[in-house]
Image (spheres, helix red, strand yellow):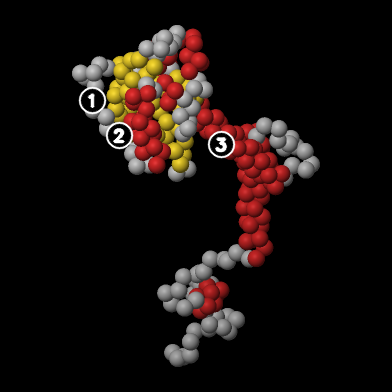
Amino acid sequence: MDPRPFQNESGGLPQQQGYDSSEEDSDEDEEPGQKRARKSEGPSDRKEKHKVVEQKRREKTKELLAELQDLLPGAEDPTAANFTMNTVLQHAIDFLTVRAARTEEQAAAAQAAGGMDVDLAYRAGFMTAATGIAYSGVDGTILEVNPSFASLLGYPADQRHKLVGRTIFSLTAPQDMQNTLKAVSRLLSGELNQVSWPERFIRADGGQTLFSVQMNSLWKNNKASCIACFIVPTDEAAAPPPRV
């Protein structure tokens, strides 16, 4: 037998059935154990995706601006040609600035109203107190008295104004004047903030009544500005010794 390989009629070697030489070429391009890489995106694909994201962002911003515009009174129509983010944000800033100013004004008004409530409550207490109360300047001139103070000295409540303008000293009995002057002096010097002693006051009819007297000094800017005088009727036996 001829040892040469069997040749077909065309003189070539026989090919295996189903064999594709293109597969061999493809396999030769890949190294063993290496996966075929996915087709990477090109610059044009990334640019297109960026455009889509940017468009969505702009649409969302426009939607939020429209919602903000609806919440702001007097804001421009969102369909207007000059409707921009800056115009809406500026309008929002203006609105919030005005709102903050109004809030501060309301807080101040509420505080003032609270202060007025305190003043009214104090005034009511002053007018209805059973204790006689008088306020005088540092020179002793009476600035105001409550109805009880006037009544205790024999003045009708509707005539208490007759005591305003007089001095505490003019109501003091002569025998007690020295103690009164000494007490007021110690109050105005700051040596004492409060003094109390028995004192006779001259009534509207010229008679004298013994009272338990207490005086307090009210200070402002480190200076005595007012004297508060409180009187309660007492008798000789119950009268405490002077503390001036």
Gap in angstroms between the C-alphas marked 1 and 2: 12 Å
Give the structural element (helix, strand or loop) at label 3.
helix
Give the structural element (helix, strand or loop) at label 1.
loop
Is the residue 180 above or below the residue 155 in the image?
A: below
82, 44: nearer the viewer: 82
Q: In the shown orientation, is residue 178 left or right of residue 10?
A: left
Q: Residue at x 68, y 44 (%)?
A: 90
- Type of amino acid at the residue the image marks with label 2: Val
Q: Position of residue 7 (x, y in %)?
A: 53, 83
Gap in angstroms between the C-alphas marked 2 and 3: 49 Å
Of the image marks 3 and 1, the number of the one nearer the N terminus = 3
Front tag of 3 and 1: 1
Q: Residue at x 44, y 23 (%)?
A: 170
Front tag of 2 and 3: 2
Q: Position of residue 3 (x, y in %)?
A: 45, 91
- Residue 64: quadrant of the picture: top right
42, 160: nearer the viewer: 160
User: Which residue sits furthest front?
Assistant: 175
User: Which residue sits furthest right?
Assistant: 81
Q: Residues within 10 Å of mark 3 (few under 14, many from 20)?
A: few
Q: Which residue is mark 1?
A: 240
Which quadrant of the rendered structure holds the N terminus? Answer: bottom left
Of the image marks 2 and 3, the number of the one nearer the N terminus = 3
Q: Residue at x 31, y 19 (%)?
A: 211
- Residue 190: quadrant of the picture: top left
- Specify whether residue 150 is in view: yes
Q: Which residue is mark 3?
A: 104
Is the residue 9 above or below the residue 241 in the image?
A: below
